[in-house]
Image (spheres, rainbow, N blue to C red):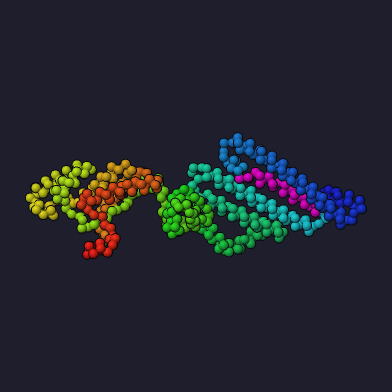
Amino acid sequence: MENIAHLFYNYFTKVGMSELWAKYLNMITLLIISLIIIYFIDLAINKILLNFFNKIAKKTKSNFDNLMVKNNVFKKISHIVPFYIALHLISIIFTDFDSIENIISKIIRIVYVLLIILVIKSVLNSTKDYFRTLPKLKDKPIESFIQVIMIFVWIGGLLSIIAVVNGAEIWKFFTALGAASAVLLLIFKDTILGFVASIQVSINDMVRIGDWITFSKYGADGNVTEINLATVKVQNFDKTITTIPTYALISDSFKNWRGMENSGGRRIKRAVIIKLNSIKYLSKDELIKIKQIELLSAYLKNRSEDIDKYNTNNNINKDLLINGRNLTNIGVFRKYVETYIENHSGVNKDMMIMTRQLAPTTQGLPIEIYAFSSDKRWQNYEYIMADIFDHVIAAVPYFELEIFELPTDLSSLRNVN
């Protein structure tokens, strides 16, 4: 080694150069030659490794090796050997310059540590991408777990770099780390909360990537695109992005629409408000007119016969409509709406269909439609619901009913009074 270290030094001194200049020129010459050798070694190893693993990736059925090639794992690994060689050549190149040798050695060791961290990161990214191709794991918060591992990798790497700079053993830093654990817990509080939340979200299957969630507190209403250690990204329907702290998923309340999307339909739950003073019993003439409505003709015929039979058998005085049993326009309207929905092509007939009367309010009597559209896509769902209520609202006057609406001018207010 001594002969190699002073190979050019001996030559320079023989030609009459001073010892100092001979040492400097010897160092520079060895450095240039070493850099050239390391460069070609790096180039050769890079080419050999990439060609070798590309061939293997094409032959194997697994997609994991393809992802490792895509994430440049083997390209980064190929740089490790040249750095290792460089580390051992330093003592030869800078044999006469101990201080420079010490500095360069530390720099190369630091770069060496960073390179290993990048290799680990690439392997973890490949693992994450591979898990996302698996049906059972593609919607799980894999990125959160990868980030936790990377935090420990970076901590280990930084401690190694500090140990290299100070020339101390790395285990002493890990001992000091235990003493500073309270401070670290405070610094990484959100990270720890996010990690715990990610585990709970994954185990309890609360949220998956692709789920539609509504989180009013953070103004989020859209599809989950990413779940990582610190945040959950939601792409709202207006294409904006909302970020939510991961731990908020277990500390606050939010709505996940997955149950609806996995069911046979999307719920329609909306009411029309009928004026109370328009509700009345139906006279025979009015009943005859309403019987012309095809959806109600069979129902009204049977119902009228039952009511007439009851009133006749019990000698009910029908001079007043309130006596005995009677049909009301609101009741017949409610039956019409329910029959109409049951026959609507956009409504899922296997799920609940109901037209119900809610408690009266100061505005009137709400008649609520409760059903499920067979098409769950938002645009089609809105179309089906609008189609139903277009018809229902237009049908109200046929039953001598009125829909409540606020007065639009002062003259209408005077008329009301």
Question: Can residue 118 be seen in this snapshot?
Answer: yes
**Front position in the image: 153 or 94:** 94
Residue 142 in the image, given as x and y percentages of width and height: 53, 49
Q: Say if 24 sits above or below 57 in the image.
A: below
Q: Write the residue at 66% across / 50% down.
A: 116
Span highlighted in magenta in the image: 71-94
297 or 153, which is in the foreground? 297
Q: Position of residue 141 (x, y in %)?
A: 51, 50
The reply to whether residue 250 is in sight is no
Residue 57 screen position, x and y as percent: 61, 38
- What main secondary structure does the magenta stretch of the protein show? helix
Q: Residue furthest top?
A: 59
Q: Position of residue 147 (x, y in %)?
A: 56, 53
Where's the C terminus, which quadrant? bottom left
* Residue at 63% over, 38% down: 54
Residue at horizontal 62 percent and vertical 42 percent from the top: 69
Q: Is residue 183 left or right of residue 311?
A: right
Q: Give the answer, above or below, for where 341 lies relative to 153.
A: above
Nearest the viewer among 126 and 174 is 126
In magenta segment, residue 334: no
Check if residue 82 falls in the magenta segment: yes
Q: Residue at x 70, y 57 (%)?
A: 164
Horizontal relation, residue 311 to residue 199: left or right:
left
